[in-house]
Image: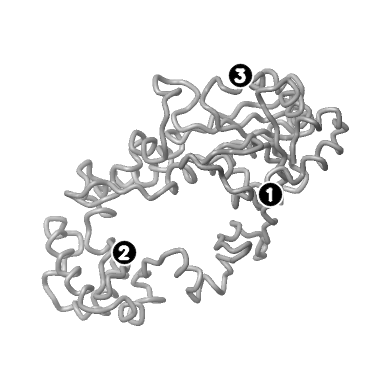
Amino acid sequence: MLSGIRIVEICGIGPGPFCAMHLADLGADVIAVERAESVSITGQANAPDNPLNRGKRSVVADLKSPEGREAVLKLLESADAVIEGMRPGVMERLGLGPLECQARNPRLVYGRMTGWGQDGPMACAAGHDNNYIALSGALYHSGTAGEAPSSPITLIGDVGGGALYLAIGLLAGILSARQTGKGTVVDAAIVDGSAHMMQLMMSLSRRGLLQEARGKSVHDGSHFYATYRCADDQYVALGSMEPQFYALLMHKLGLQDDPRFAKQWDMERWDELRDLLADLFASQPREHWCDLLEGTDVCFAPVLSPREASEHRHMVERGVYFERDGMLQASPAPRFDGQRITPGAIPTRGAHTAQVMDALGARDLAGLWRS
């Protein structure tokens, strides 16, 4: 779908590489500019083949050298967009900020991926996914009353509020550049995106379904929208919010005549009813509840690990997961015209250096680009 669009990625960690992978999955020509050897957060060298680089072409460069800077600028002359995830000001100090890059290519869309944003009092502070969603308000309701909020590891911040918002911004910028001939700078901040993602939930406050206190709203305090532990220490999730779905749940569980469950929206009784359902679900293994409830309009699903999910009949039929290069991977999404997208292979670091430099007619810079 994105054939003909070229993205240059100045490789970093987390949301930037994910965004670039997503665009590569959808057909963009993504050139990942990597260091000759990168170091992970554990202090050890990263593996030479990064799963987030699937479908990309990989080159290496020293951005601190004049030759490396010139090589990147040469790449950007034919690019639609660039992705960078440095702290504010770093790319400018390298001579690769928006002014320098758009001077070479006025149509270039310059995508900036940060946690706190390009400005504000915390812009240059270090942080990670859980810090950003804590400040934005997106973490607050991830937990029940009396429990510490639990971060859903990278999903709300790095991916949801970061990478996907950057992807939307880049594509909007590219569409604009093709109409106007002028590029733009996309400031994609996780605090902005994750706060924006809360708009749907915040809309519930008009109907009294979102309370300020954690554990008192429909999504974090009710008995019919919750997760429950089973007898085998596995978990199931309910989402029986609408009256007809709740009625079916009560019928399936044999509770349709129990007066305690008659008033679904009596919030004063939610704690009691959640405890009662907790005892009920704990009396049988997860498989029992799957046999009883899965595939019905109760709004039910087992809580699966990624490996378990890859083996579930629904996920297998849709091909949501696949294995390649000895690792479990998720398939590209969304789909177009009902067709599954097959992602490209994972390149080793620098595998395409010579190819890319030859195409640019920049062999004089090849000594700096080590494959």
Q: Position of residue 213 (x, y in %)?
A: 20, 43
As displayed, is residue 228 above or below residue 351? below
Q: Position of residue 262 (x, y in %)?
A: 16, 69
Residue that numbered label 1 is attached to? 348
Q: Earlier in the sequence, mark 2 or mark 1?
A: 2
Amino acid on which disc 2 is placed: Glu
* Spatial CA span between label 2 and label 1: 50 Å
* Residue at screen point 49% across, 73% down: 311
Q: What secondary structure is marked by label 3? A: helix
For this orientation, the residue located farthest to the front is 44
Q: Position of residue 123 (x, y in %)?
A: 44, 23
**Marking on residue 242:** 2
**Can residue 336 be seen at all in this image of the molecule?**
yes
- Pick whichever, 362 or 278, lies toward us: 362
Amino acid on which disc 1 is placed: Thr
* 2 vs 1, front mark: 1
Q: Earlier in the sequence, mark 2 or mark 3?
A: 3
- Pick whichever, 137 or 61, lies toward us: 61
* Residue at screen point 82% across, 42% down: 355
* Residue at screen point 67% across, 53% down: 346
Amino acid on which disc 3 is placed: Glu
**Marking on residue 92:** 3
* Spatial CA span between label 3 and label 1: 29 Å
* Spatial CA span between label 2 and label 3: 53 Å
* 3 vs 1, front mark: 1
State left or right for residue 224 relative to residue 20: left
Q: Which quarter shows the C terminus?
A: top right
As displayed, is residue 258 above or below residue 205? below
